[in-house]
Image (spheres, grey):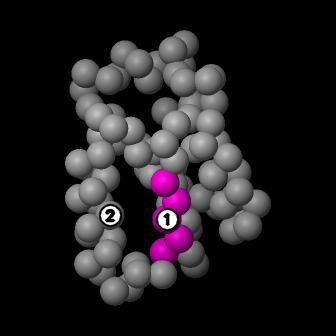
Amino acid sequence: MTIPIVFYYHRLNCYSFNALAGALDADPSLSALPVDIALDAEQLHTLVASQVSRHNRAAAALSIMTCQFRKCTPSSADSGWISGRV
């Protein structure tokens, strides 16, 4: 079963995703895994919705540093879409 991944690639968290992408690339069994990159919350919503409509499932990969926790609370999440899903 293939589960597509959508990275929420924020400039403050790019290095952690570079490491994860490198790990995925190094494993031949994951080379065909569909990976999309969202640069903002609206793109994240669009890409996840698109993958869910195609594959009936998707994983959204979010990397959050401790100093960003306050920004990820349901009351302050970007565009309200992440609200309740973090």
Callout 1 amino acid: Val
Image: magenta residue range? 33-37
* Residues packed near mark 2 inside 10 Å, few (<14), some (14 to 19) or many (20 plus): few
Does the magenta-highlighted stretch encompass residue 18? no
Q: Is residue 85 visible?
A: no
The quarter of the image holding the N terminus is: bottom right
User: Disc 2, disc 1: CB below 8 Å?
Assistant: yes
- For image coordinates 67% across by 46% down, the residue present is 46
Q: Nearer the viewer, residue 13 or 85?
A: 13
Q: For mark 1, give the secondary structure.
A: strand
- Residue 50, percent from left and from top: 71, 57
Residue furthest to the bottom in view is 28
User: Above or below — where is 77 with respect to 46?
Assistant: above
Quarter-of-image position of residue 54:
bottom right
- For image coordinates 33% across by 71% down, the residue present is 24
Marks 2 and 1, how far apart at CA: 9 Å
Is 62 situated left or right of 14 in this image? right
Does the magenta-highlighted stretch encompass residue 35? yes
- For image coordinates 51% across by 15% down, the residue present is 76
Q: For mark 2, give the secondary structure.
A: helix
- For image coordinates 23% across by 48% down, the residue present is 15
- Residue 32, percent from left and from top: 48, 81
Callout 2 amino acid: Ala
Is 42 situated left or right of 37 in this image? right
Specify the principal SS of the magenta part. strand
For label 2, the residue is 21
- Residue 25, percent from left and from top: 32, 75
* Residues packed near mark 1 inside 10 Å, few (<14), some (14 to 19) or many (20 plus): some
For label 1, the residue is 35
Is 40 situated left or right of 72 in this image? right
The mark that comes first in sequence, 2 or 1, is: 2
- Residue 39, percent from left and from top: 48, 42
